[in-house]
Image: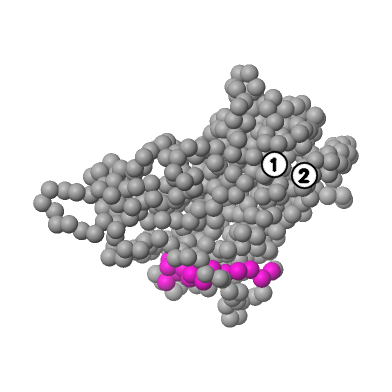
Amino acid sequence: MQSSLISYYEDFDNAACDDAPAAPKNPQLTQPPGRKPMTAQVNVPLNSRGKLASTLPAEQLAEISALFEFRRTGYSLDAPFYTDPTIFKIDMEAIFGQHWIFAGSVAELPEPGDYITVDYGPYSLIVLRNDDGGINVMHNVCRHRGARVLTESAGSTGNLVCGYHSWTYSPEGNLIHASAPGEAKFDKNCFALKRAHSREVAGLIFVCIANEPPTDFDETSKIFEPYLAPHDLSKTKIAYQQNIIEEGNWKLVMENNRECYHCDGHPELACSLFPTWGLTEGLIPAHLEEVWDRNKEAQSSLEERCRRYGLPYEVVEELDTRIAGIRISRESLDGEGESFSADGRRLSKKLLGDLRDFRLGRCSMHLQPNSWFHFLGDHVITFGVFPINEHQSLVRTTWLVADDAVEGVDYDLEKLTYTWKQTNLQDKAFVELCQTGAGSPAYEPGPYMKSEYQVEAFINWYVQRVQEHLA
């Protein structure tokens, strides 16, 4: 497939002084003529027309559109979805350029002036805690010559100073200093940093660079906030953060996460996570029947405790029937049922938030397009996937503990992180095997098993979103 194309980066009008994104409008239900009905009606952003599509040669655009249109349901994607640089750039526009993306947690920005930088595809964002306690999100691109303003992944700052020519911006992104001897004066108001949208829900921070973000995120937030709020992330701190670069397309990373068919390859995780996850009656292999019975008994006990404490536990699964696709539930763990350890016992002595019991299994949440989470009684683990290019992805894992937990006293850092450090390395290897295979001329999409239904849901969601963008 032809991969050369006109640059798809947005052209900004420097003469315009109002650089803030337009206020979201009420989206309307749209259905392009001739489009096959989707599985459910969804709100389509009014500004969803793609810029890249308008620059591609007609033949190339038709070829790409056909890949989406004739994607075989229930089968993995064709190889170009994982290997073609043009499709990757479409992903960056249609998915990461239009939707709410998980960026981090409040534990990463506890004080005014604290910031993280979030990079994906061609984009780099500054996510900063302001003096009022809110979140400012700005494109990490100086308005002078385009240099990165902040080069560290995290830190604390007052004003934002570009290291190239010392153009200086306020925490809100306003240009406050750009003097040079002999230069004519110009209107600084016209050269503020480009702004993006942010949302903070139950201690999780989300960003969106679209002019008009999808508004159904409000509805999705109402689903997951009651599950997460009792863990109170505002009273947590970072115990450890791990960044892994996987040599694989971002979709392969997400597909790998959305199933446990491969969980025999996670011996450390299998000590506490029931390997029957994703299976139902009639799908249990003979060697897992005893585990399945133990899982059902543990789940029944967990649900009884949840009802006693007023904690929601029911499965909510709308992975491909809404724009902000979600799956959330509270599920039992094996052994003592408290945490991700060899015997299922707690890994930190401090309960989170206002929880009253360690034996609460895990509250597991998947959010489209780039994140998943495990909320336990003693700690929280967040996972974010940030695409680098068509064959590389950054996976960021963050372990959070109670803010008054003391390392070496209340938790052992090596034990706290051991299970998921090992699991992440194993998943990295699995993803890279698939990326290598997708590059082979012998690759052909294969069928998903019944236990991989969430992978199918993710792919269905992805195909719908990109088709809306290309329409």
Amino acid of disc 1: Pro
Of labels 1 and 2, earlier in sequence is 1
Magenta part of the chain: 40-54
Q: Position of residue 265 (x, y in %)?
A: 69, 36
* Residue 51 within the magenta-colored segment of the rendering: yes
State whether residue 152 is above or below residue 210: above
Residue at the farthest front position = 132
Q: Which residue is mark 1?
A: 230
Q: Is residue 85 visible?
A: no
Residue 288 numbered tag: none
How many badges with numbers are in the image?
2
Q: Main secondary structure of the magenta part?
A: loop
Q: Position of residue 220 (x, y in %)?
A: 65, 57
**Closer to us: 410 or 345:** 410
Q: Quadrant of residue 292?
A: top right
Q: Callout 1: 10 Å neighbours few (<14), some, many (20+)?
A: some
Q: Which residue is mark 2?
A: 311
Q: Tell me the distance, in whole angstroms, between the alpha carbons under discs 1 and 2.
A: 8 Å
Q: Secondary structure at mark 2?
A: loop
